[in-house]
Image: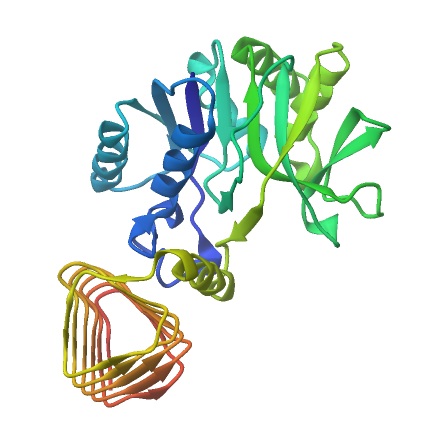
Amino acid sequence: MKLIIPMAGRGTRLRPHTHVTPKPLMPVVGVTMVERLVNTFVEVLPRPLTEAVFVLGDFPTEVNDALSGICDRNNMKATFVYQDKALGTGHAVHCAAEHLEGEVVVVFADTLFVMDRPASLDEADVVAWVKHVDDPSRFGVAVRDGGRITGFVEKPTELISNEALIGIYYVRDGAQLRSAIRRLIDEHITGHGGEYQLTDAFDILLKQDLVFKTEGVTDWLDCGTIEAFMETSRFILTREAETRGEVIDSELIQPVFVAEGATISNSTVGPNVVLEEGSSIRESTVRESILFSGARVDDSDLVDSMVGRHATIYSATGRLNVGDHSSFG
């Protein structure tokens, strides 16, 4: 079984932190988004994953190295393909067309999720993961007639379903999905935004009388904006707070995550603070904030802040959003 992971987007709503680092490689409490996704599927799928196919943009070579490391840790092969233009979700998957064979799971590396039970793939040609939401207008939705799925609609303008598609799909025969997307492109069938939408490809498969099922998730965690990223970090902190680094003459107000190689001295830190590897806080009070790797905060009082990799903050007060290799104060 293969994972197909489109991740060529630029993550513009998370800038300045994604100017250099692709959004899926942003760490969320010590583990990157994409590794959390891979780890989840390794745990919940009923059959082993043998390969991950990453659909990349114009990223530095270190991205390939990081993704290869994730696959090595999970005994999987890493394969890389590239998307030159952003022409929609269907087009992104089609960039991996030569790898759409046999059982595949397509997962978009935009969000995180929690499942409370293993996924059931039996007696289905396609499984779409969904989450019930109050306002589905921002998402694609699965439309039902009784217990049967009858269609997929991208960002509906009226309430036709509360089952939001969360960007995860299992396909028993990847070649069928490849053929459906190829038809979209050959016949220039575009959907929302004038782009080739994966939901339209699934509509083609529905008309071929394939068996569609849905699977639910316990929690669906958005990481698309600064505010959402911080909220997701807080959620994960409640489960994964721990101290691996050094804490000297300081008070920690839990939950707090202190990565290996991070240091806190003469400070009050927390609640809901993440220190990634190599970061430090000295003579400061820091609450509801994230320090990425190598960040340094001295003599400051911060709240609701994100401090980029190897950035330095001196004698600052309030809320900051500082990019990589910057200084403030």
Count the labels in the image: 0
Q: Residue 248 location, x and y as percent?
A: 13, 78
Q: Quadrant of residue 29?
A: bottom left
Q: Residue 49 location, x and y as percent?
A: 38, 20
Where is the C terminus found, in terms of image quarters?
bottom left
Q: Residue placed at 18% from the left, 60% from the top?
A: 244
Image position of 269 with respect to 77: above or below: below
Relative depth, front residue between 286 and 174 = 286
Q: Do we see residue 323 in this rendering?
A: no
Relative depth, front residue between 14 and 229 = 229
Q: Quadrant of residue 261?
A: bottom left
Report whether 230 appears left or right of 35.
right
Q: Residue placed at 52% from the left, 40% from the top?
A: 115
Q: Residue 4 location, x and y as percent?
A: 44, 26
Q: Residue placed at 64% from the left, 15% from the top?
A: 124
Report whether 74 appears left or right of 207.
left
Q: How is the image coloured?
A: rainbow
Image position of 164 with respect to 200: above or below: below
Where is the N terminus found, in terms of image quarters?
top left
Identify the residue at the far front of this view.
117
Q: Residue 230 location, x and y as percent?
A: 44, 64
